[in-house]
Image: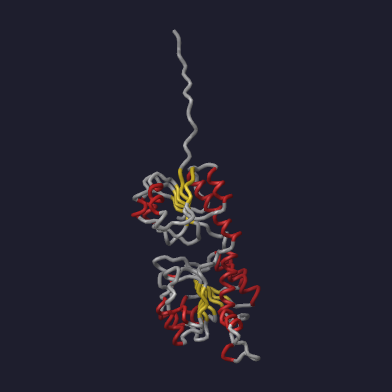
Amino acid sequence: MFILCVTIERGPKMKPKVIVYKKVDQEVLDFIQETCEVVSFEKLDSDTYPRFFQELKDAQGLLGSGLKINKELLDQAPQLKIVSNFSVGYDNLDIAELSARGIMATNTPDVLNDTVADTMFGLLLATARRMPEMDQLVKNGQWKTMIGEELYGVDVHHKVLGIIGMGGVGKAIAKRAHFGFDMPILYHNRSRNEEAEELFGATYCSLEDLLKQSDFVCLMTPLTPATENLMGKREFDLMKKTAIFINGSRGKTVDEEALVEALKTGEILAAGLDVFVQEPVQPDHPLLSLKNVVTLPHIGSAVYETRKKMAMLAAKNLVTGLQGETPPNLIK
């Protein structure tokens, strides 16, 4: 009796297909391409959307930021296994819908904490000392021998800083305030942060008490149903008339009409904003016409080194998930 043995040659295992819909460093793309087939878009617009949705039909992974990942999009991505968000915030993701379909979602926390904290403190200083306004005065040839009291700013050192949202960035801001500017720190958070209390002398308090006592109020919460329009007319009315409001969270955490009114009527002294409800903000938005407002174009983490770290972390989340393992930054 003869037994015939046949060896079947198997081709190379198919790599999972992923779509990267944000410009990232070539080193990051190379890392993903070691294990995945990559379709890359530097941006999504009316010209690229048709191809994007065509490629989406058999994609198993997505990496990018800003795109609304909702039921309508997911219906066109039946093979999707993971969405890797290139940001800390993930209000663009429908987490409930992703969970219902068994699709993993990840973000990129921690690697940008110091960079964003630098930006927020810079915005706080620029607003308090009216730096953009003074810069324009000099450039317009309006610098007189003496700057009058009407153009004076306010001190930052030794003033009370209230931080709403004592996460990673909030702690980095508290560190700068405590060690660099001798600022007493109040904070409001979903839960106590004993590390911030021990290291920076931060005091946990209610939102109402924080608003009443703080000279600077820095909003750093994620955008959730609970934090949408967290700062409205009532909250601005509680603040000191000499207080300055800083927003580095998301635009929708603030009722912008109430903020405009508070600034116009003198309910608060000034505001520094890195985020808006609609981005880019419209040129005719009333906030842009107020001298007591300093505006930035959502640049909290906009430093090359940090963005590269964020991209690589997003890539590692993506690849790990597609290899059947738990990504390091899985959103619960």
- Vertical arrangement, residue 9 with respect to residue 173, above or below: above
Residue lying at the far top of the rendered structure: 1
Q: Which is nearer the eye, 205 or 35? A: 35
Quadrant assignment for the C terminus: bottom left
Viewed as shown, does residue 200 lie left or right of 250? right
Q: Which is nearer the eye, 209 or 39? A: 39
Task: Indicate the position of residue 322 as horizontal and vertical percent values.
Answer: 48, 44
Viewer can see residue 106: no
Viewer can see residue 224: yes
Q: Residue at left 51%, top 50%?
A: 317
Image coloring type: secondary structure
Q: Which is nearer the eye, 279 or 216? A: 279
Viewed as shown, does residue 139 lie left or right of 98? right
Task: Indicate the position of residue 134 as horizontal and vertical percent values.
Answer: 59, 83
- Vertical arrangement, residue 94 with respect to residue 243, above or below: above
Task: Indicate the position of residue 79 as horizontal and vertical percent values.
Answer: 39, 44
Task: Indicate the position of residue 240 as horizontal and vertical percent values.
Answer: 50, 85
- Vertical arrangement, residue 322 with respect to residue 13, above or below: below
Quadrant assignment for the N terminus: top left
